[in-house]
Amino acid sequence: MQGCGAATWQHPPTRSDQQMLYVVSHGWHTGIILPTVELLPALSFLREDVADGPYVEIGWGDKGFYQAPEITVKLTLQAMFWPTDSILHVVSVPEAPAEYFSASQVVEVPVSREGMAALQQSVLATFVLNDQGRGIITQPGIYGKSYFYAANGYYYLTNTCNRWTAQMLAAAGLPMAPLTLTAGGVIRQVRAAQLQLSPSL
């Protein structure tokens, strides 16, 4: 992923060239929230399938663990110690992210248009697409109006949902460490990235 591990911003936003995205931490798991009006044409299937609200949350994780109706010790150990199939969870966010996810940490961060496009291309590459270029829904999601989608990549101890989030943010230009495994690590780096930006933004 481009920008991964950079010490400073790549293609940082300016006052005249910025779009807002949001990073949400639900405790152990993080996701990215994008404005639906800014979705690239290649991701328009999300708007048609699920994202009828102003925002859409996208998260990546272990297929068995993420979709399981009940979390067992076996699922937890498999997710931690064996490479397992992955899945994407896409949620329609019908109001301001901080209000909708009032029990979670939500951080707003500006990115340049170039950064937003690069992030979305990285997100798109995570989806398994059908012959029509659309994501493949596997089952309903776990809260709100949401669905699970088939995903590329394997989940394992050093390739977690939080590392995926960090890689997507790195593609957007944020300075993110290449091996970010925890939700706390993601949020700390996003807040640090905010401090690097010009106060005039």
Image (cartoon, helix red, strand yellow):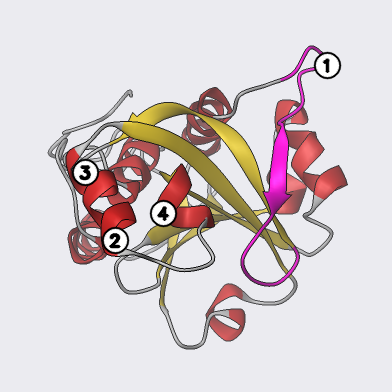
Proximity of marks 2 and 3: CB atoms separated by less than 8 Å: no
Q: Is residue 189 visible?
A: yes
Residue 18 position, x and y percent, is: 53, 48
**Which one is earlier in the sequence, the residue at label 3 or at label 4?**
4
The residue that mark 3 highlights is 176
Q: Nearer the viewer, residue 148 or 15?
A: 148
On whether residue 136 falls in the magenta region, the answer is yes
Tell me which amino acid carries mark 4: Phe
Q: Mark on residue 132?
A: 1
- Could you tell me which secondary element the residue under label 2 belongs to? helix
Q: Is residue 128 left or right of residue 84?
A: right
On whether residue 41 falls in the magenta region, the answer is no
Bounds of the magenta segment: 130-145
**Which one is earlier in the sequence, the residue at label 1 or at label 4?**
4
> In the rendered image, which quarter contains the C terminus?
bottom left
Q: Nearer the viewer, residue 145 or 173?
A: 145
Proximity of marks 1 and 3: CB atoms separated by less than 8 Å: no
- C-alpha distance separating marks 3 and 4: 26 Å
**Which one is earlier in the sequence, the residue at label 1 or at label 2?**
1
Q: Nearer the viewer, mark 4 or mark 2?
A: 4
Q: Mark on residue 65?
A: 4
Q: Residue at x 38, y 63 (%)?
A: 200
Q: Is residue 19 left or right of residue 78?
A: right
- C-alpha distance separating marks 4 and 2: 32 Å
Q: Nearer the viewer, mark 1 or mark 2?
A: 1
